[in-house]
Image (tube, grey):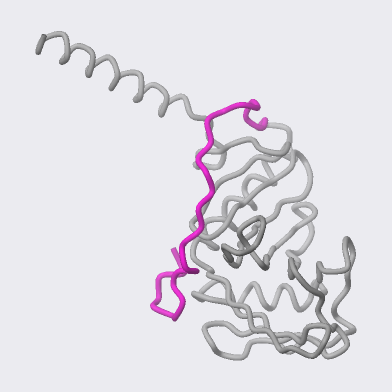
Amino acid sequence: MIRRLSIWLAVASALLTGTSVQAEQLCNQQVHQKFDETRIYSRSFIASCKPGSQCRLVTHKLDKRAPLGFSHTLTFQRTDQNSSWQILLVDVFGLAETSTGFALAIDKNPALTISSQNITTPISINEYALDETLSVQALAQAKPGDNISWSYTAKGGEVSNVRFSLAGLTKALDWAECAQAKLASGKSSPPKPGDEKPEYSPPEPDVPVDPVGDGRD
């Protein structure tokens, strides 16, 4: 019986090892296919690219009361490898009063004040895109940071301050820029649908809440 158990464990170990070896890789990261996107999971971020087109780095503000489990999203998006990264902010439940502008802070330090002229709603009325110049500035300041905060006035006058973790941003950004170039070149193909993929589970609650120096990967 002991001998049979040992043999079974050895076979199981070989199967698991084989599965790991065969996992598809792109730009030195294990990748997964979901919603016709090639993805990796990097701490607080989902990094995803569509073949030959845009890439997105998305993180969420967790809220267990929300139907989808989050109340806000922060996205860095790039349409192609020759474009600049652009920031998109979403309030899932409400609307922001764009006429009063937004403010961004990195690790509690004021970073950018954004006027209404620099905010658009290209897709839906609760998704706010910042112009490319300010987005590039914000990303440069965010890369060495631990948290980024979005302050705005909601419709009705309530002031909101939403903080997102930046843990995993550097790895997500490096992978997306590499993957976007490779997918656009046609030298790499997205993984086949149905591959094993882990569940996305961002840090809880938004780790680190206060700067402790580990947001740089």
Residue 208 within the magenta-colored segment of the rendering = yes
Q: Quadrant of the N terminus?
A: top left
**Residue 155 pos. (x, y %):** 83, 83
Place residue 104 in its image quadrant.
bottom right
Q: Main secondary structure of the magenta part?
A: loop
Q: Residue at x 28, y 22 (%)?
A: 13
Q: Residue at x 53, y 70 (%)?
A: 165
Q: Looking at this rendering, what residue extends furthest in the front direction? A: 65
Left or right placement of residue 16 versus residue 96 in this view: left
**Residue 147 pos. (x, y %):** 53, 76
Front one among 109 and 149: 149
Left or right placement of residue 9 versus residue 199 in this view: left
Left or right placement of residue 83 versus residue 22 in this view: right
Q: Quadrant of the C terminus?
A: bottom left
Q: Is residue 105 above or below residue 73?
A: below
Q: Is residue 192 above or below residue 28?
A: above
Q: Residue at x 61, y 43 (%)?
A: 39
Magenta span of residues: 189-217
Residue 48 within the magenta-colored segment of the rendering = no
Q: Residue at x 61, y 85 (%)?
A: 105
